[in-house]
Amino acid sequence: MNLTDKLNHLAIIPDGNRRWAKARLLLPWKGHIEGVKRFWELAEAAAQMGIKYLTFWAGSYGNLDKRSKEEVDVLFQLMADELAKPELLEKLEKNKTSLKVIGEWELFARDSKLKDTLQGIENKTTEGAEYQLTILFGYDGQREMLAAVKSLQQSGQEVNADNLQQSLWTKELPAVDLVIRTGGEPHWSAGFLMWQTANSQYYFTEDLWPDFKVPQLKTALEDFERRERRLGK
């Protein structure tokens, strides 16, 4: 059995950008800038390894709601700059990867152009895609679950497992096999993909996100490959 037989969906919680910057006496968003580099490196590596689904938590609802306007503006500018790069679409098409962004980020956006840019990329990368790269931005799993339940109640549908799953923002994502969390603080945050992670394996590392590179990813995947998943059996 090879890795991709066991690992269909990898999710990453990239913690430690601001601590990485602080340790180097840099402004907090310098860590985010460096973290973006790791994101693209690992996204490309995951596709090349044959991992069908990669989900990346780029920012929680709380991140956008509670942090300074200056830092939030930087996060949005980083997103806009990355999506505007011509080579991004080329890389996604080369790796047969579709891109999707899920979350309530539009509640905090100050420029409507970002949505148009994103929709254009999503439309252009859907057809013929073999891999899916999902960015969770302005995402909170608890808010997602509450919204799903409210949607069912308002429509008069029965609140059962099938209907609930189909009402989630992340309904198209399969179960997560492995969650990697960087930053040395092993915990779950804001109900992260609570439906899809019910039976997930977790890998925690002391590495701060900007220090988590392809060799560190391979170490995490090797650790996962050695595990036996019983799934209650």
Image (spheres, rainbow, N blue to C red):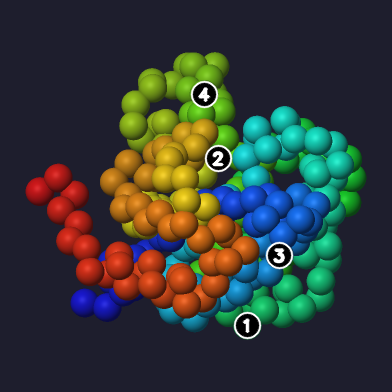
Marking on residue 118: none
Residue sitting nearer the eye, 53 or 13: 13
Q: Amino acid at mark 3?
A: Glu
Residue beneath label 4, please? 146
- Between discs 3 and 4, the one toward the N terminus: 3
Q: Secondary structure at mark 1?
A: helix
Marking on residue 34: 3
**Residue 76 shows in this picture:** no
How many labels, in total?
4
* CB-based contact (under 8 Å), mark 3 and mark 4: no
- Between discs 2 and 1, the one toward the N terminus: 1
- As measured in the structure, the alpha-carbon distance from the residue carrying label 3 to the one carrying label 4 is 34 Å
* CB-based contact (under 8 Å), mark 2 and mark 1: no
Q: Residue furthest left?
A: 233
Crowd band around label 1 with a 10 angstrom C-alpha radius: few (<14), some (14–19), many (20+)? few
- Between discs 4 and 2, the one toward the N terminus: 4
Q: Residue at x 55, y 40 (%)?
A: 169
- Between discs 3 and 1, the one toward the N terminus: 3
Q: Residue at x 71, y 52 (%)?
A: 22
Q: Secondary structure at mark 4?
A: helix
- Between discs 4 and 1, the one toward the N terminus: 1
- As measured in the structure, the alpha-carbon distance from the residue carrying label 4 to the one carrying label 1 is 38 Å
* CB-based contact (under 8 Å), mark 2 and mark 3: no
Marking on residue 94: 1
Q: Amino acid at mark 1?
A: Lys
